[in-house]
Image (tube, rainbow, N blue to C red):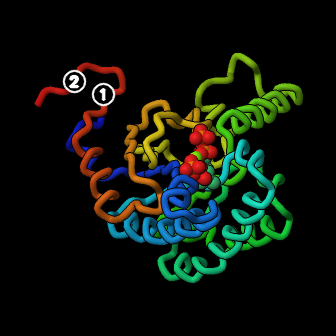
């Protein structure tokens, strides 16, 4: 079993990027300015992860629940997403990073889906790391779509209900080959998971910082990694002998 010595660096880090709105309010700015500042943090954090040797970074960028925000904010976020793709694609190629999308992609505007899928295809063979964007993502709807797909297989006679196990469910998630996140970071101090990676977070280490996402800097990133290094991942077992 992995012990402290094995978790020097998370193989997969996932981040709930929260606090853009509060950052904007603190600065007397409209919420969208907070999202713009947050997009800058994204660029930096991708680099910190690369420099630290983290192989997979999943970013919670937009939840299914976020569609209920004011239309102007949703529109602004979608346009930031387009800009993000345009600005960051060269770096993905340069560093051979594979881009993947998880979530209900059919909810997104078709021009955005086309762009996302074009970049997904163009980077599909890269092995320099993975950047996974959770867009219109909900852990519960991920499990609903997995359940439906499994039910279809049972109906076709391709699968016996008794044969369904944890591996069957894991195999029907959006990115089935990606290992579960070792570390989930949430900024802005909220102590909740907000429908993120519900299946995959079973044994993730959680790290919450009060820092708002637009203020999250390299020192904060290092602090998260330092905290992770101190954790003893027991997976329900007895503490390993030192
Ligand atoms: C996170 O910041 C960005 C998204 C959820 C899209 P918020 O917009 O949730 O910021 P707060 O929580 O209102 O401060
Ligand atoms: C979680 O943040 C979703 C994203 C970061 C995209 P929210 O701000 O939407 O979550 P709640 O509303 O505080 O739970
Ligand atoms: Mg929030």
Identify the residue at the far right of this view. 156
Residue 241: name its quadrant.
top left
What residue is shown with label 2? Answer: 239
The answer to whether residue 46 is above or below residue 107 is below
**The N terminus: image quadrant:** top left
Query: Is the Cβ of the residue at disc 2 closer than 8 Å to that at disc 1?
Result: yes
Please indicate, yes or no, whether residue 84 appears anywhere in the rendered image. Answer: yes
* Residue shown at the point (61%, 58%) measured from the top left: 133
Disc 2 secondary structure class? loop
Q: Residue at x 76, y 48 (%)?
A: 67
The residue positioned farthest toward the front in the image shown: 28
Looking at the image, residue 26 sits to the left or right of residue 226; the answer is right
Nearest the viewer among 167 and 66 is 66
Rounded to the nearest angstrom, the CA distance separating label 2 from label 1 is 6 Å
Task: Give the image location of residue 85, x and y in percent.
Answer: 65, 74
Q: Quadrant of the C terminus?
A: top left
What residue is shown with label 1? 234
Q: Tell me residue 101's x, y (percent).
A: 66, 57
> If you read the primary sequence from the N terminus, does the residue marked by circle 2 or circle 1 appear first?
1
Q: As drawn, is 145 to the left or to the right of 86?
A: right
User: Residue furthest toward the top?
Assistant: 162
Labelled disc at residue 103? none
């Amino acid at each position: 079993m992995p012990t402290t010595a094995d978790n020097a660096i998370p193989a997969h880090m996932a981040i709930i990027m929260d606090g853009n709105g509060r950052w904007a309010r603190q600065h007397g700015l409209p919420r969208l300015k907070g999202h713009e500042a947050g997009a800058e943090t994204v660029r930096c954090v991708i680099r910190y992860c690369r420099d630290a040797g983290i192989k997979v970074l999943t970013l919670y960028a937009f939840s299914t629940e976020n569609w209920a925000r004011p239309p102007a904010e949703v529109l602004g976020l979608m346009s930031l997403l387009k800009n993000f793709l345009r600005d960051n694609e060269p770096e993905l190629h340069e560093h051979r990073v594979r881009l993947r999308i998880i979530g209900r992609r059919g909810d997104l505007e078709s021009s955005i889906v086309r762009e996302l899928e074009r970049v997904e295809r163009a980077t599909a063979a890269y092995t320099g790391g993975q950047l996974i964007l959770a867009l219109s993502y909900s852990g519960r709807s991920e499990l609903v779509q997995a359940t439906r797909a499994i039910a279809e297989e049972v109906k076709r006679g391709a699968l016996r209900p008794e044969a369904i196990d944890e591996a069957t469910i894991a195999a029907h998630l959006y990115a089935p080959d990606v290992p579960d996140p070792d570390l989930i970071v949430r900024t802005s101090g909220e102590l909740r998971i907000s429908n993120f990676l519900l299946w995959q977070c079973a044994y993730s280490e959680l790290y919450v910082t009060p820092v708002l996402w637009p203020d999250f800097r390299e020192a904060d990133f290092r602090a998260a990694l330092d905290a992770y290094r101190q954790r003893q991942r027991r997976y329900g077992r007895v503490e390993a002998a030192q």
